[in-house]
Image (spheres, rainbow, N blue to C red):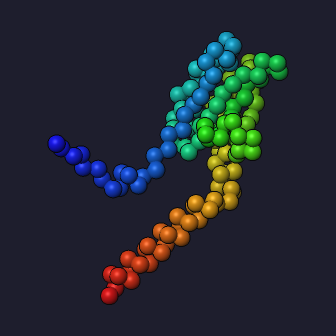
Amino acid sequence: MQLQNISNIQNNKQNFQGKLNITPGDLSYLPAKYVRKAYNAMESKIKDKPFDLFIKQNHQDRTVSIIAQKESDALKKNALKTEHFVSADADLYESVANLVIREHEEKLAKQPKTFKEKLQNFLKKAGDKFLEVMEIK
């Protein structure tokens, strides 16, 4: 029996993979055409982000919503979310997606730290101090 050697560094790395989510069959002809045109650029912008980009059409007011949000928070009422609208016949999807991503990153930076993050920072600092003390003596 062979055991695979797994590096501890790989286990501790956070690997964000933001996705571009489009509801299948939701977009009409023009929005689908423009989204296909901007798809690669939007996908490359979101791929290393800790959130996803959702695109869905609002048929009543002839707009398309571009939403930045974590997929796990999609059904939560008070979740952090950034949304902008584009006219269904406008070719502005790439620039609006960039705007949504930038604004959502700013919101994430301003968001207060959770108890879990604070505890992790404290334990990391305490561990570093402990190692420093042990190395000196």
Q: Which picture quadrant has residue 88?
A: top right
Residue pictured at 67% horizontal, 17% vertical = 26
Image quadrant holding the N terminus, namely: top left
Between 94 and 103, which is closer to the camera in this rendering?
103
> Residue 109 placed where, x, y %?
65, 55
**Above/below status of 63 relative to 9:** above
Residue extending furthest left?
1
- Number of marks: 0
Task: Name the image quarter holding residue 38.
Answer: top right
Q: Is residue 63 left or right of residue 71?
A: right
Residue sitting at the far front: 1
How far from the left and from the top, in percent, is residue 79?
71, 44
Could you tell me residue 46's position as x and y percent?
56, 38
* Image quarter hosting the C terminus: bottom left
Judged left or right of residue 87, residue 136 is left
Q: Residue at x 46, y 50 (%)?
A: 14
- The one nearer the camera, 88 or 17, is 17
Q: Quadrant of residue 101?
A: top right
Report the residue at 61% width, 24% height from top: 22
Q: Is residue 124 above or below residue 58?
A: below
Outermost residue, right side: 61
Q: Residue at x 64, y 14 (%)?
A: 25
**Residue in front for this viewpoint, 56 or 86:** 56
Q: Is residue 121 above or below residue 34?
A: below
9 relative to 127, above or below: above
Question: Residue farthest to the top?
Answer: 29
Q: Is residue 101 visible?
A: yes
Q: Is residue 45 visible?
A: no
